[in-house]
Image (tube, rainbow, N blue to C red):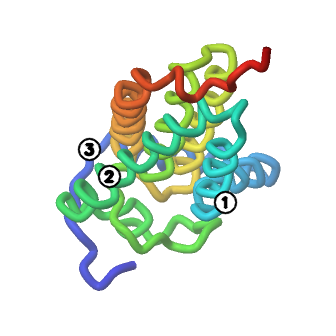
Amino acid sequence: MPANVGRIFYMDWELEFLHHLQTIHTPELDKKMLFFTGLGDKAILIALFLLALIIIPKTRKYGIPMAIAVVISVLIVNVAIKPSVMRCRPCWLDQSVPLLIPVPHDYSFPSGHTNAFFAMATAVHLKNKKLGAPALVIAALVAFSRLYLFVHWPTDVIVGMITGVLSAKIGYKITNPFAGLFKKKKRR
């Protein structure tokens, strides 16, 4: 926990909801939630994945909007909102709940994991609904894992979803006029 715990504000229902989630823990569900939250902990792997999508001509139409959406989402959440709002995490406030992951040291609002995954999933969904649907399910599971693991408030996750979707829509607006450039040229 940082020396400055940050601003302590939440709604009573949020803490009640998070405490309720603590009652549904099972070893199998713990493993699944650790897996989904772990997806967001690997920034370098996400960057390499996006780079691979950009390099491969067939997937470039997904990779470029996803990468732009992630950059926008990180700037909005991690650079602008989190340091301005400085909201404490539930695990900082109630240390009686045992954590399955190390205590995060950055501020809570909004959820960066949720934001990034909804930015990527929405970017895919805007290009291809069939591929976007499972991507949105994965993003939702990452978001839920943050609540399950007691490291985010529900409103952190809700705003993370909103900022992620908006970031993807901005990325789509930026890249869509250039969509023809991303297509692989056919040989005659």
Q: Quadrant of residue 86?
A: bottom left
Q: Nearer the viewer, mark 3 or mark 2?
A: 2
Spot occupied by residue 187 in the image (x, y as percentages of width and height): 78, 20
- What amino acid is labelled 1 in the image? Leu
Q: Quadrant of residue 40?
A: bottom right
Are the two marked residues, 1 and 2, in contact with CB atoms closer than 8 angstroms?
A: no
Taking the view exactly as shown, the residue that stands out farthest to the bottom is 3
- What amino acid is labelled 2 in the image? Val
Q: Secondary structure at mark 1?
A: helix
Crowding around mark 1 (Cα neighbors within 10 Å: few <14, some 14 to 19, many 20+) is few
Q: Nearer the viewer, mark 1 or mark 3?
A: 1
CA separation in Å, label 1 and label 2: 20 Å
Spot occupied by residue 90 in the image (x, y as percentages of width and height): 39, 60
Say whether residue 28 is left or right of residue 71: right
Crowding around mark 3 (Cα neighbors within 10 Å: few <14, some 14 to 19, many 20+) is few
Taking the view exactly as shown, the residue that stands out farthest to the front is 188
Q: Secondary structure at mark 3?
A: loop
The residue located at (61%, 14%) in the rendering is: 129
Closer to the camera in the image, 102 or 78:
78
Asked if residue 39 is positioned above or below residue 4 in the image, the reply reads above
Residue 77 tag number: 2
Give the labeled residue for mark 3: 11
Spot occupied by residue 144 in the image (x, y as percentages of width and height): 56, 41
Give the labeled residue for mark 1: 45
Crowding around mark 2 (Cα neighbors within 10 Å: few <14, some 14 to 19, many 20+) is many
Nearest to N terminus: mark 3 or mark 2: 3
Nearest to N terminus: mark 1 or mark 3: 3
Say whether residue 110 is left or right of residue 119: left
Nearest to N terminus: mark 1 or mark 2: 1
- What amino acid is labelled 3 in the image? Met
Closer to the camera in the image, 99 or 81:
81
